[in-house]
Image: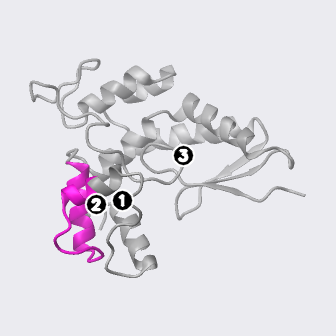
Amino acid sequence: MRKPPVFLTLLVAVLAGCTASPPGSVGGEDADGAGRSRALDLDGPWADAFSQAYERASTDEQREILADGVVTDAEYAQVYDAFARCLADVGYEVTFPPSGGITIQGGAPDAPDSVLQDLVGACDDQHVGDVDYLHEQVSRNPENLDEWTIMADCLVREEVVPPSFGRADYEAWFTSETAGDLPYTVDARTAEVAFGACNADPLGLFG
């Protein structure tokens, strides 16, 4: 019997659904405030993040994409095409549904999930690295504004949390291991949809 599809949602930094990384973990300005990258001669709000990603990159392909401080749509597609070919070489079929994420099917019927997880991780490291993360983050937050603030503001605009909900509240929830759900004022499904929309487009840039 063919194994059922494995659904993996790719968002900011990992191969599983999650919120964007917290402030301070994705770059920002140097101590002199100029926003100049040390490893790459780049300027701008995402310069340090590109520099750090360049230093971590495991392949020349990734470094070439990151070197100019821009990840184009074509480069984003390029790394995921390579990722799909990497998994195809070991017997898995990768598709990209219109709703987002990826679907992976195939492999040995009796193979444990850990086998696929290891293969996905290896192909991601080899071909994707931080390229997808930076493409997505620069698209949703081009000025690298404070993540806690833009998420809190978006949730308030969506009217799913109290008007008083602010940066400190979102940070406390995000960084707590026992916080549970956010203090939503709506039903769970409405809250889930609103949170997903804010995580994808906290500044309302995509219409």
Q: What percent of the width, then of the height, locates residue 167?
A: 20, 57
Q: How crowded is mark 1: few (under 14 residues within 10 Å), some or many (20 or more)?
A: many
Asked whether residue 165 is drawn in magenta, I would say yes
The quadrant of the picture occupied by the N terminus is: bottom right
Q: Camera-side residue: 98 or 22? A: 22
Q: Earlier in the sequence, mark 2 or mark 3?
A: 3
The three-letter code of the residue at mark 2 reads Pro
Say if 72 sits above or below 103 in the image.
Answer: above
The quadrant of the picture occupied by the C terminus is: bottom left
Reading the image, the residue beneath label 3 is 15
Can residue 89 be seen? yes
Q: Give the range drawn in magenta.
A: 146-171
Secondary structure beneath dot 2 equals: loop
Looking at the image, which residue is at 30% across and 76% down?
A: 160
Q: What percent of the width, then of the height, locates residue 105?
A: 74, 52
How far is the residue under mark 2 from the one under mark 3?
21 Å
